[in-house]
Amino acid sequence: MRFLLWLLLAVGALANVWINVVAGFSGASHVAASVCSGAAVIGAAVGLWLTRTRDAV
């Protein structure tokens, strides 16, 4: 499970860079693509945070 979340985080981050640098999107398509990749990255980060191991100190 955590492997898939890490994979989603990495792919989402790379997709966000690609959307902003390489892709020729403009206007609403650029916004929609950025929102989708950002939601994937935020979702993966939250999932990783919620599934972390908690050590009792």
Image (cartoon, rainbow, N blue to C red):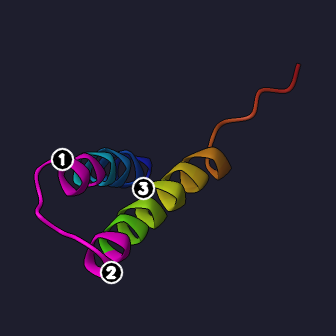
Cα gap from disc 2 to disc 1, whole angstroms = 16 Å
Cα gap from disc 3 to disc 1, whole angstroms = 30 Å
Which disc is residue 28 wearing?
Answer: 2
Disc 2 crowd, CA 10 A, few/some/many (<14, 14-19, 20+): few
Quadrant including the C terminus: top right
Q: Residue furthest right?
A: 57
Residues shaded magenta: 16-32
* Residue bearing the label numbered 1: 21
Disc 3 crowd, CA 10 A, few/some/many (<14, 14-19, 20+): few
- Dot 1 falls on a residue whose secondary structure is helix
Mark 3 or mark 1: name the one nearer the start of the chain: 3
Is 16 situated above or below 36?
Answer: above
Q: Nearer the viewer, mark 2 or mark 3?
A: 2
Is 33 situated above or below 56?
Answer: below
Mark 2 or mark 3: name the one nearer the start of the chain: 3
Is 7 situated above or below 53?
Answer: below
Which disc is residue 35 wearing?
Answer: none
Q: Nearer the viewer, mark 3 or mark 1?
A: 1
Looking at the picture, which amino acid does disc 2 mark? Answer: Ala
Task: Report the front residue among 50 and 27.
Answer: 27
Looking at the picture, which amino acid does disc 1 mark? Answer: Val
- Horizontal and vertical percent for residue 50? 66, 51
- Dot 2 falls on a residue whose secondary structure is helix
Mark 2 or mark 1: name the one nearer the start of the chain: 1
- Dot 3 falls on a residue whose secondary structure is loop
